[in-house]
Image (tube, rainbow, N blue to C red):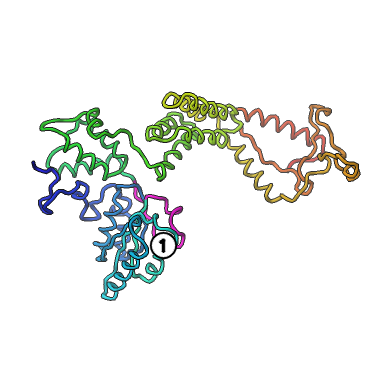
Amino acid sequence: MTDLFADPARGGPRPLADRLRPERLADVVGQDHLVGPSGTITRMLRSGSLGSLVLWGPPGTGKTTVARLLARETDLAFEQISAIFSGVADLKKMFEAARARRQLGRGTLLFVDEIHRFNRAQQDGFLPVMEDGTITLVGATTENPSFELNAALLSRAHVLVFKAHDETSIGQLLDRAEAVMERPLPLDEEARAVLVRMADGDGRAALTLAEDVWRAAGEGETFDAKTLQEVVQRRAPVYDKAQDGHYNLISALHKSVRGSDPDAALYWFCRMVDAGEDPLYLVRRLIRMAVEDIGLADPQALAQCIAAKDAYEMLGSPEGELAIAQAVVYVATAPKSNALYTAFKAATRAAKENGSLLPPKHILNAPTKLMKAEGYGTGYRYDHDEPDAFSGQDYFPEKMGRARFYNPVERGFERDLRKRLDYWARLRRERQGGGES
C-alpha cells in the first residue's frame, strides 16, 4: 500500500508539519509582525546584528522553525537542546564546542527549547557565554518570560512574542498542505472551518489533523462536520490549565464581566467549561469579580455568586453549570463600581503607615478606675441618643486626622450610599464646625 506521506527525497514517511517547514523566513506563516517586510526580525537581520532572543508564544506557532532559519540567515552553526532532557553536563559540552568553533571564526546559535524548564541556577549558566559572544542564545518558551526566566537573562535578551495562528494563517497552512499532497482535503466547507477551529491556533495541530483526515477518507469520500469530529475524535479546543491559555481565558472572562458584556462573558465561560475547567474555580473567580468590580453598587451580585456555588455543589455537572451561567450574566449586567476595592486598598495602606497610632480615648471602654482616671471613654456620645442617631464624632487616631477612603459612584445602590455619606458629612461639619480631609 502506498504511504500518502512518504517523502521520496528522504526515502521514508515524514510528518506533514516537517515536510512543510519553511525554507526562508519570508515563508513563515502567521508572524508577519516578526518576519514580514517591516517585522522585528527582518529589521534585525537588515542591520547585520542579531542578539540573543527569547521566543515566547503558544505551541505550533513556528518558534523552532524561526530559530533554525535565523542560524541559516546569519551563517551561525545551529545547535539545539531541550531543557526537558538536558542538564548542566550537556550545556558544558555545548559551550566548549561553541568556544572551539569560535576560535575557528564561526559563531554558534544555541536554540534551547522549553528554556523555562531550566532552574534559576542553570539559567545563570548562560550569562557568561552570552556576554562574551561565545553563543547567541535563542530560547523558546510557552510561559510568560517575566515570571519564568531570570531577570539577568532577560536583560541580555530581546523577547519576541509569537501569536497564535488565526483562521487566515491556518487556512494558508492547509492550502500549502494540499499543494504538497497534490489533492484537496476531503472536507466540505463547514467541516474545513471546524478543523481550523479544532487546531485552536496551533499550526502543527492543524497539519496533524489534516493528516488524520487524508488517512481516514476513502476514495471519493468527503467528510461533513459531524463525520470529521467522529473521525478525528476531537471536539472543542482543550488548553493546558498550567499554561498561559488558562490565564488568558479567565482574563477574557473577567474583562468581559467588567465591561458589562454578558454575551462575551457567557462565551468565555462556556469556552473554559468546554475545555475541562473546574466550574468551582470559575465560580470562585466570579465571587472575586462581584466584590472587586461591583461591590456595593449591587450587593446582590455577591449573593448570586455564592448561591451559584451552592447550586452547583448540589446539582453537579452539567446541570449545575446553568446556575453559574446565571451568575455570569448577573455580574456582567450589574452596575459596576470599584469604590469598595479602592477603599480597601487605601485603608490597608493607611493601616500599614499608621500602625502604631492608638484609637482616640473617647471611643475606648474604661473597665477599670485607672482607665477612667486616664480619660478613657470621656466625652463619648452615644449615637442613638443624638438627633438623627448621628453624633458626628471623629473615630480616627488623633495624630492621623480624618481620611476618606470610600467614594461610592453614582451607579446602582451606591448612589443611595453616596447620598447618605454626603448627608452625614454635612451633619458632621455642622456639629464639629470643621471639614473632612
Is 147 one of the magenta-colored residues?
Answer: yes
Between 340 and 432, the one nearer to me in the picture: 340
Amino acid, disc 1 = Gln
**Is 155 or 135 nearer to us in this picture?**
135
Determine which quarter of the picture holds residue 434: top right
Residue 239 vs residue 422, the one in the foreground: 239
Residue placed furthest toward the left: 1
* 22 is higher (above) or lower (below) than 327: below
Where in the figure is residue 387, as x and y percent of width and height? 82, 27
**Quadrant assignment for the C terminus:** top right
Where is mark 1, residue-wise?
A: 122
Residue at the extreme bottom: 103
Q: Residue at 41%, 63% (x, y): give it.
A: 156
Report the magenta residues as a range: 142-163
- Where residue 302 sits, quadrant-wise, is top right
Q: Position of residue 418 (x, y in %)?
A: 67, 32
How would you rate the neighbour count of disc 1 (Cα within 10 Å): few for under 14, some for 14-19, many for 20 or more? some
Residue 424, horizontal then vertical, whole percent: 74, 32
Say whether residue 269 is magenta.
no
Q: Is residue 358 left or right of residue 86?
A: right
Q: Quadrant of the N terminus?
A: top left
In the image: residue 340, left or right of residue 379? left
Task: Say what secondary structure mark 1 lies in.
Answer: helix
For the residue pair 60 and 121, the one nearer the viewer reads as: 121
